[in-house]
Image: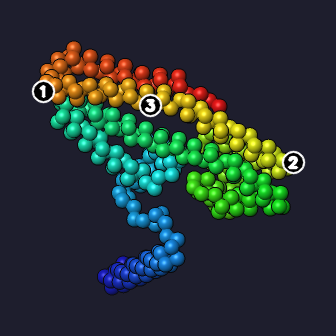
Amino acid sequence: MDFQQLITLTTGVTVLTLGLAVAGLHAYAAGRAQRQALVERLSATGQLTDGLRARRFGRLDRGLRRTKAGRKLELRLAATGLDVTPGEFFVYMLAAVTGLFLVGQATLAPFFGPIAGLLGAWAALQFLSWQRQKRIERFIGQLPELARILANATQAGLALRTAIGMAAEELEAPAGEELGKVANQLALGASMDDALGELADRLPSRELVVLVTTLVLSNKAGGQVVSALRNLTETLEERKETRREIRTQLSQVTMTSYAVPALGVGSLFLMNGVKDGALDRMTGSPAGQAAVLVAFVLYATGFVLIRRLSRIDV
């Protein structure tokens, strides 16, 4: 290849690259314009949701989603209904752990810094579990109304897919949101078994499993789906009242389970307040450190045992 051909090839490649760059910039600008127009239209009609807000820590979030732990965290966040990405939650948890680490070192003793950090991480994960359980309880409370809507829609001659979409529009969150996800999956071609199965995985409960099983079997084999849903509605109403009574009876035990470790942590602040530097001297020896660790383990064991003994499955 002589010099003239090399110049021609270089010029052609340069022109092609510039052309592709201009086309890419044009597509990017058009996409941003369409998104901005959509945001303005939804804002004008009052239908703009938080799902369109700008996400933080995008690079960290993409990296976490590639890992197994990140995918599990994403599923747990989806079950809680919180509008938080795995990256955002990880950063917030890391900030809380760091803050508690510094507070534990400054207010108690340097030995309590790592313990406070571990408690912060545990508390963040427990918050997700609590939020998920709270969402499950709210969903269970809506199941009788959901079964009633499905029964009425099916009795009116509507298909089960249409009935689910109607229930998603009529019910409030979390049932409306979760059924909306099921309706979107069905619209994209997912089977009824897979869509309802994912719903049961996100919000596991005996009541939901019974409802999902009834809907799946009725969708496969047919049968008296209306009468089955009517009977299920009555059963769910009775279980709802039973769960409410049990929760009321066990409220004192639940408060006791939280009061036990709170008293242990409060005693540390009381001890340090009565005599400044007492915790420094106590944790300055291996025996004192071992005693503190054993005490924390015993308090954690008491908390778990009280929660387990007070758990009644209905």
* Residue, disc 1: 276
Amino acid at pointer 1:
Asp
Answer left or right for 215 relative to 284. Answer: right
Q: Nearer the viewer, residue 208 or 93?
A: 208
Can you give x and y, in whole percent of width and height, for residue 231 in the image?
Answer: 79, 43
**Image point (33%, 34%), residue name:** 119
Q: Nearer the viewer, residue 112 or 242?
A: 242
* Residue, disc 3: 255
Choose top left, top right, bottom left or bottom right for residue 266: top left
Q: Secondary structure at mark 2?
A: loop
Answer left or right for 75 relative to 63. Answer: right
Amino acid at pointer 2:
Gly
Amino acid at pointer 3:
Met
Q: Secondary structure at mark 1?
A: loop
**Image point (38%, 25%), residue name:** 260
**Image point (54%, 46%), residue name:** 135
* Residue, disc 2: 223
Between marks 3 and 1 in the image, the one whose residue lies nearer the viewer: 3
Q: Is residue 272 above or below residue 150?
A: above
